[in-house]
């Protein structure tokens, strides 16, 4: 395939997934900074109820959203298969489960502890919205859905923004430094709805994840790390919100 074909393919994948999320986050950020009041007095809510007061319908919407969000990953798998590869080419498989789990847990522990401190600091300085990781009703499926949502986020972001994007950028002639910058800035862009802190923190995380991917040659550990980070954020907030004084709530 020509470079132009690969470039167009990459743009279409991003337009159907995290590239579109980046544009949406930018529009949301513009709305936040132009609204009266400071950023920390506004909230960015994740995992909200889709049908308040109707738990079974709400569950159906939650599962629908999680499933359809994974479609771009299936598209990436199809595109890789067309060129004679697969998701295994990106290191997303079950051939090395324990090293992936171990490395991912270590990365999550390091980034998670520093990430919480960074979020609290930038919010206190007025550079970030108050992030509300979950606002689901207290029903039996709440925690399973939060865990599924975390895993979905991890798979979509690491497969597309790290494994697939770096592969395609390299095939279209981008230098390693430019590809690292592109991947990291994209990761920051679709977190801009959280504020400047969300953008900068995720750019740094993107740089770290790209360097680890190049060292290990696998997105598996990154998916594990990201899933653990999001599970900690979603479930931790559900358990601690309103019970500890240091955790901001809307």
Image: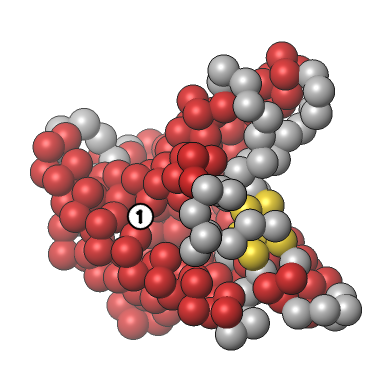
- Residue lying farthest to the top in this orientation: 56
Q: In the displayed structure, would residue 147 be above or below residue 89?
A: above
Place residue 145 in its image quadrant. Answer: top right
Q: Which residue is mark 1?
A: 163
Residue at (34% x, 70% y) in the render: 114
Q: Quadrant of the N terminus?
A: bottom left
Q: Is residue 21 left or right of residue 179?
A: right
- Viewer-proximal residue among 100 and 85: 100
Residue at (38% x, 36% y) in the render: 81
- Viewer-proximal residue among 185 and 63: 63
Residue 36 pos. (x, y %): 88, 79
Residue at (52% x, 60% y) in the render: 245
Work out whether residue 244 can be spotted: yes
Residue 31 pos. (x, y %): 83, 72
Mark 1: secondary structure: helix
Place residue 127 in its image quadrant. Answer: bottom right
Place residue 42 in its image quadrant. Answer: bottom right
Residue at (17% x, 51% y) in the render: 103
Residue 233 pos. (x, y %): 46, 50
Q: Residues within 10 Å of mark 1 (few under 14, many from 20)?
A: many
């Amino acid at each position: 395939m020509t470079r132009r074909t690969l470039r167009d393919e990459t743009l279409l994948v991003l337009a159907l997934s995290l590239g579109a999320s980046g544009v949406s986050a930018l529009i949301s950020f513009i709305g936040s900074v132009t609204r009266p009041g400071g950023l920390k007095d506004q909230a960015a809510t994740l995992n909200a109820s889709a049908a308040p007061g109707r738990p079974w319908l709400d569950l159906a919407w939650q599962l629908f959203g999680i499933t359809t969000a994974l479609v771009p990953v299936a598209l990436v798998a199809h595109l890789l298969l067309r060129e004679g590869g697969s998701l295994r080419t990106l290191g997303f498989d079950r051939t090395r489960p324990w090293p992936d789990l171990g490395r991912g847990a270590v990365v999550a522990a390091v980034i998670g502890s520093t990430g919480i401190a960074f979020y609290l600091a930038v919010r206190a300085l007025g550079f970030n919205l108050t992030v509300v990781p979950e606002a689901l009703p207290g029903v039996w499926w709440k925690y399973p859905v939060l865990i599924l949502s975390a895993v979905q986020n991890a798979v979509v972001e690491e497969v597309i923004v790290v494994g697939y994007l770096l592969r395609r950028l390299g095939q279209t002639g981008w230098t390693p430094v430019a590809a690292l910058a592109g991947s990291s800035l994209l990761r920051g862009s679709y977190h801009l709805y959280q504020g400047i802190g969300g953008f900068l923190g995720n750019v740094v995380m993107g740089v770290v994840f790209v360097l680890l991917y190049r060292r290990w040659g696998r997105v598996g550990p990154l998916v594990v790390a990201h899933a653990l980070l999001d599970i900690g954020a979603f479930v931790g907030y559900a358990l601690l919100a309103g019970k500890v004084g240091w955790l901001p709530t809307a």
